[in-house]
Each structure stands twice: as C-alpha cells, then as structure tokens.
C-alpha cells in the first residue's frame, strides 16, 4: 500500500507540479526580463552567460505595407528620406487588427542597447514562429530568414520555419529589422517570442528546442510502433490500434510544431503541405483518443458521441485536404474547441472508470490528471501569449506512457493467466494422453474380438450368410481394422510426445524392407485400380535406420497415397545423394493445396486439396511419420500440384558399415559370445532338458539368414538339440540347398533379407511342398497383423519375434517337426487303409473270375490262382513305415492285376507295356498300379467296346518318366479341374490324391494329367535318378 501511494505521489509531481512549475517559472521570468518599450530595449545589464538569451517581447515599431532595409533607416535618420508613419505593436501577437486583415506585409523594428564592455564575438537572433515569410537585419547587416517576403503573393515565397542567424555588432547600440509577409494563413505577424543573445546562448536555446522536439517525436513514434506491431499480432485488441494511431498522430503533430522538424527533414516539402499535416494531425489525434477511451472503458462513451466524432473527423479531413490553408486555418479556434470537448468527455469516461474501483483504477486517476493538464495548458495558451504547445505534448506523452504501463501490466497479467492455464492444460493434456493410451490398450482386445468374430461369420462359421449380411459384416471388419490402425497411431503419438520411443538404429536393406511393405500394402489396399511401382538404383547402399519404424514410415506414406488416389499409380523410388538416401512416394491423386503443404504434418491436420475433408482419418499418420523421420536424423517434405498428385520425400543416412557387411566373417569367439548371450538372456544352458523329446530319426533343419552372427546363433542353439543343421545366407541359396537335400524337415528363415525376402522364399518353397511336408518358421522383428497375415498367405507355418528367445525357438521347432512326423504317420496310415480297401476289391473280382473259369478252363483257373497268390504276397510284404519299393515289385503288382482284369474283360481290354530295360530304382509303393486300375475301370471299361491302356517307363535326361495312357471316355474340364486341385472325393479321387501328395512330398512335383472328353487321358509323373 505504501509503494502504491509513493507511485501516485511521484506521478502527481510529474503530471501536475512540474508543468505548473514551468508555467510559474515562465511567469516570473517574464516579470524579471526587460521588455521592449517604444521600440527600444536596454540589455546592457543582461548577463547572457548566466541568464541565457533574452526575449524581445514588448512594443515594437511596425511599418505596415513597407519592406524596409537598414539603408532606409539610415536615410530617415539623416533626413534624406522620410518613412511612412508607423505604429506600435505587441510582439508576439497577430497583426490582423493593425493591418485590418491577415494578408499583407510590413516591417518590425526594435533598437537594442548592449554592454560594450562585455566582449562578444557575435550576437544572434532566433525566430520561432513568424507568419509566413521573413528577412532579418541586425546592425545594418542581413543575417537571413525563411521564405522571401514580397509586396504581393506573386513574388512572395511563404515558409514558416524557425530561424537562427549571427553577426557582429559595432558599438553599444544596434537596430533589428524584420521584414514579414503573409498571403497563405488566416493570421500573420510575429506570433512567438524573438530571442536575442550572444552566440552561445542562442545556440543553447536552439539545441534545447531541438532536443525537446526530438524527445517528443520519438516519445510518440516508439509507442506508435510498439502498439501497432502488437496490434498486428493481436488484432482482437482494438485498443492497441487506436492507441498506436493516436501516438502516430501525436508524432506528426510534434513534427509540424515547435522546430517544425518535418520542414527541416524534408526541405523540398511545400509550406502549405506542412500546414495541412499540422491541421490533420490534431484532428486525428483527438479522434483516436476518443476511440481508445471508448474501447478501454466499455459503456462510458455514448455511441452517438462516437458517431459524431466520426462525422467531424471526416469533415475536418475533407476540409484540410480540399481547401487552402488560408481557409482551413480560420477553423483553428473551432478545432481547439472540439479538442477540449473530446478531452472533457474523456475525463468523464475516466471518472466512470474510477467509480468501478477496478484494480487498475489508479491508472484512470493518472490519466485524468494528464488530460486535465492538457485542458489547462490549452486554455492558458488560448488566452495568453505563452507557447504552451510543448507542455501539452509533454502531458500527452505522459498519458501515452501511462497507457503503455497499463497495457504492459494487463499483458503481464494475461501472460500469467495464460501460463497458469498452460500448466493446467499440460497437466490435462498429459492426463488425456494417459487416458487415451490406457483406453486404447483396453480397446484392443474387444476390438480384435469384434473383428475376428465378424470375419469368422463372414467365412461361414455360423452358417451361410446372405449377400446383405456379408456386406454388413465386411463393413464391420473394415471399420474395425481402421479403428485398430487409429489405436496404434494414438499409442505411437503418445509415445512420441513423451519421448518414450528409442530407435534401434542399425544397417538395414531399404529395398528389401520396401518390397515387403509394398507386398503387404498391395494386399491391404483393396480393389482400387491403382498400380504400385518400385524403382531402385543399381547400387543401393544399406541405410542407418530402425527397421520397424522404417516400415511404419513407408506404411503411412503408402497408405496416405492410397487414401487420396482413386486410380492411376503409386511409385516408390529412391535416389542416393552422397551420404544420404532420399526415399520418395509419388501418387497421381487429388494433390494438396499450397497453403496446406506444411499443415498436413501437424497433429490432427489433413490436407487433400479439396474444399472439405471427405476422406476421413484423424490426421495423426503424417505427424507421426514426420517425428519418426526427424528422430532418425532425416527430413521430410512434400511437393504437390492440386489435381495432379503429390510426392513425399524423406531422407535416411547411409550406414557407415555398409561396405564391410558383405565381406564380414565373424570369428569363433564372436560365435560363442553371441550364442552365450542368447542363452544367458533366457537363463538356459546347452544341456538337454529331461522333458526334451529326442527324435530317433535324423531331422534336418535349414537355417536361412543373411546376418552371419544371427545365423551362427541359430545353428548353435539348434545343434545342441541333436538336429542336423544346414545354413544358407540368402533365399536363392536356400532353394539350391532344398534341391540338394530333399529330406529337409524344417526351414527357419528371417523375414528381411536382401534380394529374396523370407516371404518370397516361402512362396517358392510352397510351390513344391505343402505346410505339413515342409514346415517354415519365420523370424521377424515386427508383428503387425498385416505382416502376419501376409506371412501365412505366403506359406509360413509359424512366426517368432526377434530377438529370439532360445527356449521359445526350441519349443516351436520341436512342435513343427513333431507336426510333420504326425502328418507323415497319418499319410502312411491312409496308405495302409488304401491297401486294405484295394485287397477286398481284388479278392472279390478275382474270385468271381476264377469260379467262372473253373468249369470252362481248369488250367486257366489254376494260372489265375497263381497270379492272385503273387499279388497278395506282394501286397502283404508292404510295411507302413516304408516309403519306397523296387520298381520290379510295383510292376509285379501291375502285371498280376492286369492278368486278372484281362481274364475278366477278355478282348475288350488291351494293355501295352513299354518299359525301357536296365532301369533300377525305388518308387513309392502303390504309385503305378492304382493309375493302371484307374485307366481300366474309369477309362476304357466305361465304353462298351473297351479300349487300350498303355504303360510307359523310360529314361528322360536325369529323370524317369512313368506314364499311363488310355483311349477311354476321358474327363470333363470341370472334373479335371477338381482332380487337379485335389478337391474331389469321387471315383478314383482318393487314389490319385494320395499318390499326388506322396510324389510332391518326395520329389517336389506330382501327377500331370491331360484329358479330352471322349478321347482318353494321360497321367504321368517323373522320378529323379538321384
């Protein structure tokens, strides 16, 4: 409270006491200063060093309608010339009454007496306001002036600016002559004091006047710039605009009064224009003051008064711009009256402000005092000869300074409020992020349940669905998947915002990662007519990045391109530029408006080049992408043309180790260290667990990984489990090893590999082997549902996340191998069942034939019994665990079967053998005989006339051809498609399906079937000699 009163006291002294003290000082000085009387002033006792320059106020001699020179005065004194009558006039004052009009010309004269004993080099005269042109003569010498006085306006040059001139004085007396003319203003004459003194005192006076005017000028300009610039930033704060414009008008007023600095700074500016600026600045200043008060004190100013002010200021501006100074200068008293009314009305508003007892009401009090002093000073200046314009400017400057402090305090309070709100918002924001993250986690499980249930119903788990139901279920599934992506984005956004994401930066193969992402994206995008293209440089270096986050960046950019592209193409390409790789995703979509190019990377912002967002989404994807790119040390930007498409670019640093990786061979110590690290991570040792199942068979595992350390770790972990492990460093090498070692029981492959990825390798292996015949375990560092789905579609049996857990790896390997063993056992059991199915059939047919033959041809019946016994002997020699039998054994079965069938069908059946001699090999049991039986029963015997069956076994290169051909009824295209796809269970279907599966498992290729309806069929297969 004490500080408050101290500040009010200091402010009162500055606002009231100081100006009143100045007025009192001027009054006292005027009484002590000598005055001009009857055209003479005695300055012989005036101490210019102590008191400064003297004002030559008083009664001057005035010669109307004469422009006298010192020569004229000398001639008058010597009697050679008699001057016109003269009169006495007050200086400073207007000559309107003396001349009877404002326009005209005349000469002012005064005689001065100085102290001759005081040695001064030069004396000077300083004029401040002489309307509107003047010449000054001192001691018979012209010292200068402003403008050029003339006897008429044609030869007169009007210029009303302060003037200072110096010359020497001989003796103790000197005459001062001042020629004056006015043809452009409503009043003329010397209207401000004339200063006389030695050179030093006059220069001090001039410098002081310049200093005060410059202080006033910059005192207005700085607040004007401050308030107007602040208003540009906060355009809703109207008081800043009006206070800034008020200050600017005050600066223009200061430039055109006192020293009239505008004329000094711009000497080419006509005098009339200076007068216009002088007139307009005063009008605008008080108008902007009124508008400012109206804004800061709401309700205190009547709107009718504001509208009246608008009308008056427009009228004043029109008058000031359209009429000459001689006309609008006559309105100066009315301008003063309007100014006083505005100030008084502003004081009324300040009282209203003070009554509200607001926290800043003391500023209202100070503002009232400054405006009251302006009224007082204007009044004093109007009724006296004192020039109070400087003090009025001073009070207005104080008023602006008070408003600056008030504005600063209000902004400081607003800033504190904003800070408090910001802190509160940050807390709320963190709570919101935590809530969103927790909610997202909780939503995941039920959301996946909804998706899976809808998907299962769509696939017929609860029975057949109608088209409308299928459409609705598809909508539920797609909506759920989009929501799942949104949840993942929210979680990533929260992690990025809290700096919880740490990148695992390593040397990765960009092309391999991108190809996998494109495969997943191409599968996920749907049925739009869009082509995904890739373009990669020939020598693509490895890049330094987090593999998972790089995939996420590519997913987001490709997904964004797909979202805004309805048809056309999306291109993914890269360029190598020094130590950086620039990756680009280009689309032919709708494009992005230029003013949105930067906004789209902000959170929850979208830009699609259209008037409204119709694409959906939350706007998080690109924001997350930008943060991930920048977190990895890169930059991201976009180029776009609305209607033509967009190109997103981002940079990745080239890996520093990419030149060494291809030739890197780790040492044995590194192998051991890597293996031990993997074991210690899981607390395991290399000893076999008592529950571990030790297979009696020699199971072979193929490990595929391009990283030598990872490859060796897998070899070490699996070798301890008594598996035979072979390794490949690429997908191509793995395919060659598969050809060389057909007995491989399991493939363990990494997903991301240069060249051929694990996905492509799985597809290639599945062309020859089914899921049960050759299980594939895929190792991946990322487990997104889209990735897993793509992997399963490519033919993987199982997935294992990297880094590999040793115990989990062994468990999954053991499970997959046991699965294969179980499936092989089931196949053997099915083959045994087939044998059991075939034997009663043969026995039934053979016995019927033998019984029928006994009565007719006993010898033939005996031969048939011998063939039957050989057939049964061969069948009972099969063991379920045998996979291969000699070719001659299979041929014996075929011949015995054919002998029995020929006895049954006689001439209707013709069987031809074309077996190349010298072929000795093992083949799967029951692989030829069922084909011959199928050709007889379902081919030629379906025709009444019968037909011919041909069996051909020949050597073709490094393979043996086995072919069964008939000229029977053939197979329809629909039936043939079912047989080849293995979907049929009809006649002959079980046998053919079983044979095809066993051949594919053993040799990689199955049965080849050709058939033409009504012309016959050809069934063949190949057996490699190795």
Image (tube, grey):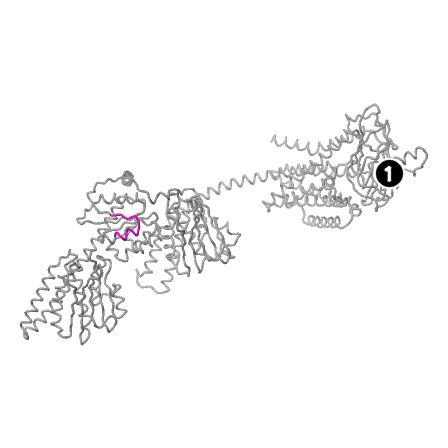
Q: Secondary structure at mark 1?
A: strand
Q: Is residue 877 above or below residue 315?
A: below
Q: Residue furthest right?
A: 79
Q: Nearer the viewer, residue 349 or 378?
A: 378
Q: Which residue is mark 1?
A: 107
Q: Position of residue 474 (x, y in %)?
A: 37, 60
Q: Is residue 732 magenta?
A: yes
Q: Is residue 805 above or below residue 907?
A: above
Q: Look at the picture and state if 402 lies above or below 513.
A: above
Is 439 magenta? The answer is: no
Q: Is residue 331 left or right of residue 758?
A: right
Could you say which is closer to the camera, residue 4 or residue 701? 701
Residue plotted at (53% across, 41% down): 418
In the image, taking residue 528 as reference, residue 218 lies left or right, namely right
Residue 587 position within the rendered picture, expressed as x and y whole percent measured from the top left:
45, 56
Span of residues in magenta: 726-737
Quarter of the picture holding the C terminus: bottom left
Rendered-image quadrant of the N terminus: top right
- Within the image, what quadrant is residue 460 found in? bottom left
């Amino acid at each position: 409270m004490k500080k408050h009163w101290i500040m009010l006291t200091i402010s009162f002294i500055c606002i009231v006491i100081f100006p009143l003290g100045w007025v009192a000082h001027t009054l006292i000085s005027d009484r002590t200063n000598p005055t001009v009387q009857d055209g003479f002033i005695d300055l012989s006792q005036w101490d210019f060093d102590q008191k400064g320059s003297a004002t030559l106020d008083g009664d001057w001699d005035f010669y109307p309608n004469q422009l006298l020179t010192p020569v004229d005065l000398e001639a008058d004194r010597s009697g050679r010339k008699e001057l016109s009558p003269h009169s006495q006039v007050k200086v400073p004052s207007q000559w309107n009454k003396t001349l009877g009009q404002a326009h005209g010309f005349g000469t002012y004269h005064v005689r001065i007496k100085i102290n001759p004993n005081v040695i001064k080099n030069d004396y000077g005269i300083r004029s401040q306001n002489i309307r509107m042109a003047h010449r000054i003569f001192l001691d018979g010498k012209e010292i200068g002036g402003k403008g050029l006085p003339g006897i008429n306006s044609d030869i007169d040059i009007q210029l009303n600016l302060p003037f200072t001139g110096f010359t020497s004085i001989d003796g103790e007396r000197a005459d001062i002559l001042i020629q004056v003319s006015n043809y452009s203003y409503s009043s003329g004459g010397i209207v401000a004091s004339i200063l006389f003194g030695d050179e030093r005192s006059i220069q001090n006076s001039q410098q002081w006047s310049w200093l005060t005017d410059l202080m006033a000028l910059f005192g207005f300009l700085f607040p004007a710039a401050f308030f107007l610039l602040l208003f540009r930033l906060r355009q809703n704060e109207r008081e800043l605009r009006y206070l800034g414009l008020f200050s600017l008008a005050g600066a223009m007023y200061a430039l055109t009064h006192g020293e009239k600095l505008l004329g000094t700074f711009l000497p080419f500016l006509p005098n009339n224009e200076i007068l216009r600026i002088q007139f307009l600045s005063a009008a605008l200043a008080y108008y902007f003051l009124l508008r400012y008060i109206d804004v800061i004190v709401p309700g205190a100013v009547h709107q009718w008064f504001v509208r009246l002010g608008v009308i008056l200021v427009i009228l004043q501006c029109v008058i000031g711009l359209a009429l000459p100074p001689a006309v609008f200068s006559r309105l100066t008293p009315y301008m003063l009256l309007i100014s006083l009314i505005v100030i008084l009305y502003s004081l009324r508003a300040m009282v209203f402000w003070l009554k509200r007892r607001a926290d800043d009401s003391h500023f209202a009090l100070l503002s009232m005092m400054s405006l009251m002093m302006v009224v007082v000073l204007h009044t004093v200046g109007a009724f006296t000869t004192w020039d109070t314009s400087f003090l009025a400017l001073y009070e207005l400057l104080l008023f602006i300074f008070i408003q600056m402090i008030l504005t600063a305090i209000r902004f400081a309070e607003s800033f504190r409020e904003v800070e408090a709100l910001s802190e509160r918002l940050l807390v709320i924001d963190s709570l919101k992020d935590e809530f969103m993250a927790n909610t997202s986690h909780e939503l995941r499980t039920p959301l996946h349940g909804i998706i899976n249930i809808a998907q299962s119903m769509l696939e017929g788990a609860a029975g057949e669905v109608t088209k409308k139901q299928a459409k609705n279920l598809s909508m539920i599934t797609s909506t759920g998947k989009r929501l799942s992506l949104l949840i993942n984005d929210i979680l990533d956004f929260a992690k990025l915002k809290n700096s919880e994401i740490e990148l695992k930066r390593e040397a990765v193969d960009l092309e391999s990662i991108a190809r996998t992402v494109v495969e997943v994206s191409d599968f996920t995008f749907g049925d739009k007519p869009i082509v995904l293209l890739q373009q990669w440089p020939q020598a693509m270096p490895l890049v330094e990045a987090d593999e998972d986050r790089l995939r996420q960046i590519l997913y987001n950019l490709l997904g964004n391109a797909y979202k805004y592209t309805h048809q056309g193409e999306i291109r993914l390409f890269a360029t190598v530029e020094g130590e950086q790789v620039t990756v680009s995703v280009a689309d032919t979509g709708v494009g992005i408006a230029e003013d949105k190019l930067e906004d789209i990377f902000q959170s929850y912002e979208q830009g699609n080049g259209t008037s409204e967002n119709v694409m959906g989404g939350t706007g998080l994807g690109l924001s997350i992408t930008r943060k991930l790119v920048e977190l990895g040390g890169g930059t991201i930007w976009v180029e776009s043309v609305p209607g033509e498409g967009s190109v997103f670019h981002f940079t990745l640093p080239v890996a520093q180790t990419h030149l060494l990786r291809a030739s890197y061979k780790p040492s044995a110590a590194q192998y051991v260290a890597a293996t031990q690290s993997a074991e210690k991570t899981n607390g395991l040792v290399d000893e076999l667990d008592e529950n571990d199942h030790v297979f009696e068979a020699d199971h072979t595992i193929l490990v595929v990984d391009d990283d030598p350390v990872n490859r060796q770790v897998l070899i070490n972990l699996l070798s301890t489990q008594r598996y035979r492990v072979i390794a490949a460093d690429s997908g191509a090498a793995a395919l060659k090893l598969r050809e060389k070692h057909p007995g491989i029981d399991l493939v363990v492959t990494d997903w991301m590999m240069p060249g051929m990825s694990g996905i492509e390798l799985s597809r290639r292996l599945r062309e020859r082997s089914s899921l049960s015949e050759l299980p594939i375990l895929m190792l991946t560092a990322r487990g997104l549902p889209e990735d897993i789905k793509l992997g399963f579609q490519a033919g993987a049996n199982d997935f294992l996340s990297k880094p590999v857990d040793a115990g989990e790896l062994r468990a999954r390997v053991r499970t997959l191998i046991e699965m294969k063993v179980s499936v092989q056992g089931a196949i053997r059991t099915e083959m045994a069942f087939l044998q059991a199915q075939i034997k009663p059939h043969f026995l039934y047919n053979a016995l019927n034939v033998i019984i029928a033959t006994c009565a007719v041809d006993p010898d033939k019946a005996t031969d048939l019994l011998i063939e039957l016994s050989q057939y049964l002997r061969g069948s009972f020699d099969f063991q379920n665990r045998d996979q291969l039998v000699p070719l001659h054994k299979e041929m014996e079965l075929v011949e015995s079967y054919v002998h029995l069938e020929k006895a049954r069908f006689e001439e209707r059946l013709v069987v031809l053998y074309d077996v190349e001699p010298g072929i000795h090999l093992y083949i799967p049991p029951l692989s030829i005989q069922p084909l011959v039986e199928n050709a007889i029963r379902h081919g030629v015997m379906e025709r009444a006339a019968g037909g011919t069956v041909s069996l051909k076994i020949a050597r073709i290169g490094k393979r043996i051809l086995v072919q069964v051909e008939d000229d029977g009824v053939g197979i329809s295209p629909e039936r043939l498609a079912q047989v080849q796809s293995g979907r049929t269970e009809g006649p002959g279907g079980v046998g053919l399906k079983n044979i095809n599966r066993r051949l594919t498992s053993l040799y990689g290729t199955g049965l080849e079937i050709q058939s033409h309806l009504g012309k016959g069929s050809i069934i063949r297969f190949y057996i490699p000699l190795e």
